[in-house]
Image: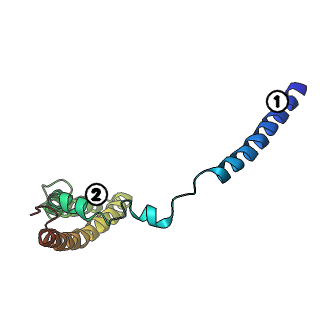
Amino acid sequence: MRTRSIALSSVAAATALLGVAGTAAADSSTPAPSASASAKTRTGDGAQALCKRAPKIDKRLHRALHRLQGKAGVRGSVARLEKRVEKAKAAGHTEIATFLNHKLAHRKSLIPTLQQRQKDLAKVATWCRSHQNTTSS
């Protein structure tokens, strides 16, 4: 018990000493960089990186939309999930049908979102070509 209190008091004393020394060192050191110096660092909007990645993003969006809008034989398609919901209802599995219906609603909501992203990305690609940041198609 006594050794614990001695250890705690020595740690407290060391902390207090370092705190005072740290404050004194901070006062004598060079001033912190001003706002103008930090403004010279990268503060861009990521346009160059986005222009570079635009073709890959477009391919990924195209693949996702193609999969979602596929026929009933395509894994991940809305049509396939609709078929699963019908089968669950026909089998009398109401809990499964409810779960799949919620999943279906979410999957259907993805289509307009992805289509809007594709339109936005087309505008980005046009901007990139006009600003010659990179060649994007």
Between 7 and 56, which is closer to the camera in this rendering?
Answer: 7
Q: Quadrant of the C terminus?
A: bottom left
Q: In this view, does 5 lie to the left or right of 72?
A: right
Between 24 and 48, which is closer to the camera in this rendering?
Answer: 24
In the displayed structure, would residue 10 be above or below residue 75? above
One can see residue 121 in this view = yes
- Circle 1 Cα neighbour tier, 10 Å, few/some/many (<14 / 14–19 / ≥20): few
Q: In this view, does 12 lie to the left or right of 107?
A: right
Q: How many labels does the image show?
A: 2
Between 15 and 17, which is closer to the camera in this rendering?
Answer: 17
Tag in front: 2 or 1: 1
User: Which residue in the structure is indicated by mark 1?
Assistant: 7
Q: Position of residue 31 (x, y in %)?
A: 57, 57
Residue sitting at x 85%, y 35%? 9
User: Which residue in the structure is indicated by mark 2?
Assistant: 91
Q: Is residue 22 left or right of residue 77?
A: right
Please state which amino acid type lies under the numbered disc 2: Ala
Residue, far top: 3
Mark 2 → mark 1, Cα distance in angstroms: 71 Å
